[in-house]
Amino acid sequence: MKVVIVDDQTIVRDGLVTICERLPDVEVVAAVGDGRQALAAVAEHSPDVVLMDLRMPHMDGIEATRHITMDHPATHVVVLTTFIDDESINAALTAGALGYLTKEAGREDVDRALRAAARGQALLDPAVHARLVALARQQPAAGSRELPAGLTAREAEVLICMAKGESNREIARSLFVSEATVKTHVNRVFAKTGSRDRGQAIAYAHRHGLG
C-alpha cells in the first residue's frame, strides 16, 4: 500500500512517517507540508491512501481532498486532525474523505483506517462518530417524514448501513440480500444524493438524519 502523508507540522509529519513505515506492507512514498504539495505528490506517486491534515497554509486539507477525489478517484483520503467540530467533519466527508481520525489515534487506529480506505471503506474515529450520531438525533426521524432525494425505503436502509461504516458484504448480511443487489442500491444512492463516493454519501446521510 502506497501512502502519502500531509501535515504542516514537521514533528507530527515525521512521527507519522515513522508509524506508517513500521506497518506491514505500507510504503510512505511522500511526506509533504500543505495541500498544494499533496496534489503534486499524488500526481507523481498515485498512492492508495493519503493521510491528510486539515488546517494548513497555501491549500487546506478540505480543498486538497476535493481535488484528489475528483482527479484521482483511485486514491482515497483519511483525515487526521485535532478538529472534531461539526463543520470540519461534514466538510471533510463531503469533500470525499473516507476516514476521519483525531490526533489521539494510535498506531493500530491508523493502520485500520489506512487499510479500510484502501478497500474503499469508511472508518471514523469513535469521537467523530459520536458527534455525527448526536447531530443526526437532532434531525426528525427518517420514518416520520418523506425520505430525501427520492430514496426508496431500501435505498435509505442501505445508506444508513453505509453511515455505520459497513462494507457491501456486511450490508448484504444485515439486509439478507446479495452483494450484487447491495452494489446496485449503493450506485443508486450515489446517483440520487449526488455523491461521488461513500464518504460523501455518509456525510449526506448524517446531514439528513439517516446516520
Image (cartoon, rainbow, N blue to C red):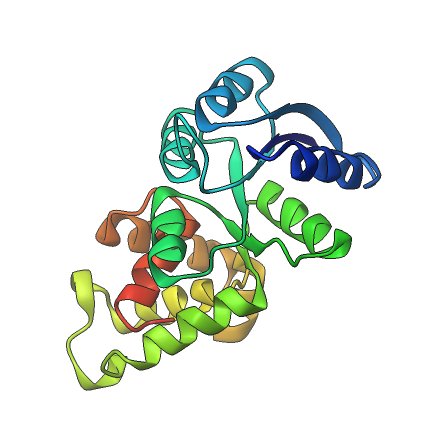
- Which image quarter holds the N terminus? top right
In the image, taking residue 33 as reference, residue 85 lies left or right, namely left
The quadrant where residue 61 appears: top left
Residue at the bottom extreme, as displayed: 144
Residue at the top extreme, as displayed: 44
Viewer-side residue, 100 vs 183: 100
- Residue 128's place in the image compared with 24, above or below, is below
Viewer-side residue, 192 vs 109: 109
In the image, taking residue 40 as reference, residue 19 lies left or right, namely right
* Residue 28 at least partly seen: yes
Q: How many marks?
A: 0
Where residue 181 appears, as percent x and y from the top left, is: 43, 58
In the image, taking residue 188 as reference, residue 8 lies left or right, namely right
Q: Residue at x 46, y 35 (%)?
A: 56
Viewer-side residue, 179 vs 116: 116
Where residue 47 appears, as percent x and y from the top left, is: 60, 26
The quadrant where residue 133 appears: bottom left
Q: Residue at x 60, y 44 (%)?
A: 119
Where residue 120 appears, as percent x and y from the top left, is: 54, 45
Q: Residue at x 50, y 20 (%)?
A: 37
- Residue 129's place in the image compared with 121, above or below, is below
The quadrant where residue 173 appears: bottom right
Q: Residue at x 40, y 45 (%)?
A: 197
* Residue 185 at least partly seen: no
- Which image quarter holds the C terminus? bottom left
